[in-house]
Image (cartoon, rainbow, N blue to C red):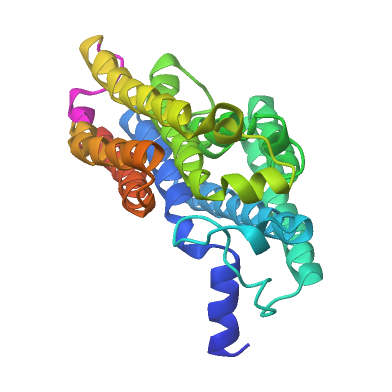
Amino acid sequence: MSSEKIKVWLAQIRANFLLLPVLLVSLGGAMAFKHGFFNWYLFYLTMLGVISAHISVNLFNEYSDYRTGIDFNTERTPFSGGSGMLQAGLTNPEQVRFFAWFILVISLIIGLYLTWQTGPILLLIIALGAFATIGYTDYLARWILGELFAGLCLGTLVVLGSYLVQTKQLNLAALITSTPPGILTALLLLLNEFPDVEADRKGGRKHLVIKFGKKKSILIYGFFLALCYVVIVFSVLTNLIPRTTLIACLTLPLACLAFYGGWVHSTRGETILPALKWNVLVVLGTDFLLVIGVLMS
């Protein structure tokens, strides 16, 4: 495969978004390490399985948005609107669909092996994740459930599953630690939907921004963004998570910039691009600092 073809497929799988699952698995692993459990082999295998699942989601989404015409009408940005590889004819739909299923099968094989090593609770997490992977674009994103399932299956459950693989148990500390990443993953999707409202509506989608409009949706975004930091602070004050995780609150100024950017876009029609950039930095930065905070403890 030529270097140009590799670049095309890296764009097609949205490789620049794969740092998120790396951080989520790392957070689950860091929590397990803090509690006296850690196996590098299981950690890397979990990482491979989760990244594979994330790639599969991206490919299914790209295929569906090509088939429905959404990505032909969307306002493409570095953060939303698809890769554009299918629209440019650099890949073809059947290739993308084949690799979406192929990579999903790889992810499921890894998941079943980890279930054999871990126990049946992990199988429930994997089953929910597989349902979200296959059904997100054609079903969940049309039933106002896209943001919820994105936050749950590409956020909270990744952290919990990664912790479960290492420790073979779940507890309140793991659940609390996994909550902010789940909220942030949902908010990443929510704000990225703003530029695509008209294209998504024409393509049959129904998400929060279509349902409530941009002004109400940015208030929803702001509420849950604030809730994310409240959960962190409250959990530290009640000794549910280490005090050092307060370092994650250093992203609060960026969160304010993201909310302000979304607000002026919704009320004055200014460009959403700065808000999308700050939002990505908030999500990745907070997740990264949570990992560091747990390890520091």
- In the rendered view of the protein, which quadrant contains the N terminus? bottom right
Q: Image quadrant of residue 188?
A: top left
Q: Residue furthest front?
A: 268
Residue 297 visible to an observer of this rendering = no
- Where does residue 170 sit, x and y in percent of width and height? 50, 21
Residue at 35% across, 20% down: 227
- In the rendered view of the protein, which quadrant contains the C terminus? top left
Q: Image quadrant of residue 197?
A: top right
* Magenta highlight on residue 240: yes
Residue 79 visible to an observer of this rendering = yes
- Where does residue 147 sit, x and y in percent of width and height? 56, 33
In this picture, is 26 found above or below 252?
Answer: below
Q: Image quadrant of residue 102?
A: bottom right
- Where does residue 289 sit, x and y in percent of width and height? 26, 40
Region of the chain picked out in magenta, as a range: 239-246
**78 vs 5, nearest the viewer:** 78
Q: Is residue 114 left or right of residue 21?
A: right
Residue at 44% across, 49% down: 20
Q: Is residue 203 left or right of residue 285?
A: right
Q: Residue furthest bottom?
A: 2
- Where does residue 154 sit, x and y in percent of width and height? 55, 39
**238 vs 250, nearest the viewer:** 250
The mark total stands at: 0
**283 vs 163, nearest the viewer:** 283
Residue at 65% across, 25% down: 121
Q: Is residue 91 left or right of residue 216?
A: right
* Magenta highlight on residue 85: no
